[in-house]
Image (cartoon, helix red, strand yellow):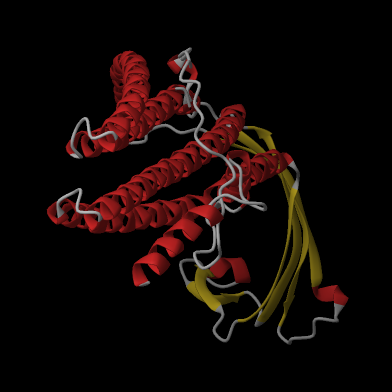
Amino acid sequence: MKRFLYFFFLLSLSNVLVGQGAFTVEEAVRYAREHNAGLDNSRLEQQLSAMEEERLGRSWFPQVSASADIRYNPILQTTLLPAELSGGSGGGLVEVQFGAAFSSALGLTVRQKVYDPVFHLERKLSAISQKKAVLDEAFENEQVQLQVLAAYYQAVLNLDAFRNSQSLLVDLDILRQDVRILVENELESPALLNSLNQQYRQQQNAIYVDSLNWQASLAGLKLEMHFPAGEELLLADSLSLSMRDTLNLNAADNYDFQNFGLQLEESRNALNRLSRSKLPAVDAEGYLGAQFFSPSPDLYNFKRWYGLSYIGLTASLPIYDGNDRRYGAQIENLKMEQVRNQMQAYRIEQENKTVRASLQLESARAQALLARQAIQTAEQNLMLARVNYQNEVTGFQPVFDALQALSNSRGQLINAKASYVQALLEARLLDL
């Protein structure tokens, strides 16, 4: 009775794996994209890049600042002046104090950039950052899809393996019943029935292992989807591959190559900025204010307030920087050489991976074809072996061997599909 309940549990488990309200592959990918923090951050990075560009553009707006201060000078500055300035005898010195005990200042300063030699390069750098953010989002989008596809089809393949084990268990049970009848009629040895019972118990354990593998792969899919671990996840799609996919890869425009290109753009931009930083930067500045001087803190005595203003241009020209620009240029050139080396090595690597993926796909197709042929042959052999056994033409062993061969052939087909999916996903990863 316990074995029956155990088998019923496993059978019911496989029945709830596919049902209404289940996720298709497309729905699983969509769910993962909606709940992926990396994608959300990529979108936020684009917003940050756009804001940085807006912020950079607004640096050309006039910059207005106000200032105010009030000071008390308990000790006034003392200096020595020639005595004849105050009517004294020549050659002598008199002490004179300057300033007032209380002083204050109010002012308004307006600054405006006139010429910035690196501004347009800063805007180009901001544009490169924005391109990178868009590229990162597209890559993250595709990567999420491939990760979910891999996890989804791994779960489906483990489900196929689980059902294959179930099918073998059912066939073994049918054989057990047939042999039990023969043993009861003294037409077959009890040792054969004992052997079948042992095989049946081993297959029950194999089903349990396959069910654990299935549950583990389902947990892996939940992980890739960012799906709550405690909630039930049902799958709607099965793995029905045409296995006729052809590779049409263009690895030259994938994420890594585009990223290399953006790195080169950044280095060129840095070189241009270093070169143009030798030019002067020009700013215009205007100031309008008033200053207060008095021996007492009577700020409302407007006779003690004196106006002050100026308008001017300031040019800042770097003369010597300790060879910082020269070393900076050398560093950027070395970085560019590194990137070019990476691009060359990556190009060769991608070409070899493309050839390998094509061969793996072809190998998986050949394995699947052989497995299907083996399944067809095993089904025919099993049918013939059963007829011969029932007609007492042969013993039981050919029946068992044919049944085991059928299960193995189905397992080979599952393995071929797994190899095909892996090769296909690796090929798509090359084209990201």
What residue sits 56% from the left and 75% below the top?
Answer: 96
What residue sits 58% from the left and 31% below the top?
Answer: 131
Q: Can residue 234 be spotted in the picture?
A: yes
Q: Can residue 325 be spotted in the picture?
A: no
Q: Position of residue 255 (x, y in %)?
A: 47, 27
Give 410 or 430, whichever is nearer the viewer: 410
The answer to whether residue 255 is left or right of residue 307 is left
The answer to whether residue 60 is left or right of residue 351 is right
Give 361 or 353, whichever is nearer the viewer: 361
What residue sits 49% from the left and 64% below the top?
Answer: 229
Give 240 or 293, whichever is nearer the viewer: 240
Q: Quadrant of residue 392?
A: top left
Give 183 or 364, whichever is nearer the viewer: 183
Residue placed furthest toward the front: 185
Q: How many marks?
A: 0
Q: Position of residue 315 (x, y in %)?
A: 59, 35
Q: Position of residue 345 (x, y in %)?
A: 28, 18
Q: Position of residue 277 (x, y in %)?
A: 49, 29
- Which image quarter holds the N terminus? bottom left
- Figure check: 71 above or below 314: below
